[in-house]
Amino acid sequence: MDLLAHLDAYVATADEAGFSRAADRLGIAQPLLSRRIKTLEEHFGGPLFDRSRRQITITELGSLLLPYARDVLDRAQRLRQVADTAGRARTCVVGVPVHCAPAALARAIRAGTEHGITLGVRELPPQERALGLADGSLGYALVRVAPEQGALRVPLGLASAPEPDASGPPAAGGGSRRAVHLEELRPRRGRSSPSATPLPVLTLPEDHVPYHEDRLERAVARAGLPPGRFRPAGPAATALAETLAGRSLLLCAEPFARQHGACWAPLGDRSLHRGYDVSAAPGRTGPPGVPDWLVPLLASAVGATGGGSGTPGSGTRADDVPARLAARG
């Protein structure tokens, strides 16, 4: 027996002094309400209502039990309210890459409040975001995937000092947006001065994922560059300082470069760009999947410009073919 539903029928009938009006109040059929009253009377061992007259009246047993029934229903209602409030107040943590745009993250937090969700943001490396989803410490996360497989794609490019010297890539300075190809980083023939020494290219922890490092290694080999030309960066602040001082180039996304006053140009090899999916932790409480309103806000935070092949309705484009071939080596 669903005790609360049966007590609801009992209290409504006592208040309305009639089965028909009580059924209308509860939004159920009158025969169902009558069955619930009868079941409750069998459970309590006596009649709750006197049906012998034109208008039903409550019995002595019914009057005795009515205050307790009301109290049970009131407590159940308060219990539901407390549970609902606790559910809304529970923070849902979102794992994002390090150095996302703060203004975009703020918009995501505000949108969560508007949708009744308290969002917390935690900046983590790619591997820790994946682990956080698996162990439930994260509710949602931006997960690194291959760019041709992800719903979001973030172009990677080379950041350089505002006034790069001649050894920098041609498209990395002067505000040019022409795509940079790795072949252009080869030392120029006939140049032996110190200023012509090739600059190292630093890579951030966000790109230290196995499949990306493997693709980058193959692309560097195809371009005829020495393996040590691309190096893992230490702290991002140090890598930026080296880049802005003209001592290195930095492999990063455009918003990160522009935010700190560096020049930037995209890589021509699309297979080396970043790919992301916004994923929800398996078995998390609340509605399944990722809220539709959250995806574009997180895309903005990482500087995503469009989807890979996983984007609904994206289709297959001709300029994706070189990226797919390069990804396969």
Image: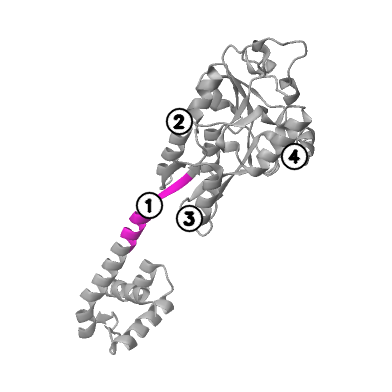
Measuring from the top left, give residue 295's x and y in whole percent. 55, 42
Going from N to C along the chain, the mark reached first, 1 or 2, is: 1
The answer for how far apart the CA atoms under marks 4 and 1 are is 41 Å
| Viewer-side residue, 42 vs 108 | 108
The answer for how far apart the CA atoms under marks 1 and 2 are is 23 Å
- Asked if the residue at tag 3 contacts the one at tag 1, i.e. Cβ–Cβ closer than 8 Å, the answer is no
Task: State the residue at coordinates (22%, 75%).
Answer: 68
Q: Quadrant of the N terminus?
A: bottom left
From the viewer's perspective, is the residue at label 3 or at label 4 nearer?
4
- Asked if the residue at tag 2 contacts the one at tag 1, i.e. Cβ–Cβ closer than 8 Å, the answer is no
- Tell me: residue 253, above or below residue 48: above
Region rendered in magenta: 80-94
Q: Name the residue beneath numbered marker 4.
A: 327
Going from N to C along the chain, the mark reached first, 3 or 4, is: 3
The answer for how far apart the CA atoms under marks 2 and 4 are is 33 Å
Left-right relation of 69 to 185: left
The answer for how far apart the CA atoms under marks 1 and 3 are is 14 Å
Going from N to C along the chain, the mark reached first, 2 or 4, is: 2
Measuring from the top left, give residue 86's x and y in whole percent. 34, 55
Q: Name the residue beneath numbered marker 3.
A: 136
Left-right relation of 78 to 249: left
- Asked if the residue at tag 4 contacts the one at tag 2, i.e. Cβ–Cβ closer than 8 Å, the answer is no
Local packing at callout 2 (Cα closer than 10 Å; few below 14, some 14-19, many 20+) is few
Q: Name the residue beneath numbered marker 2.
A: 103
**Amino acid type, label 3:** Gly
Going from N to C along the chain, the mark reached first, 3 or 2, is: 2
**Amino acid type, label 1:** Arg
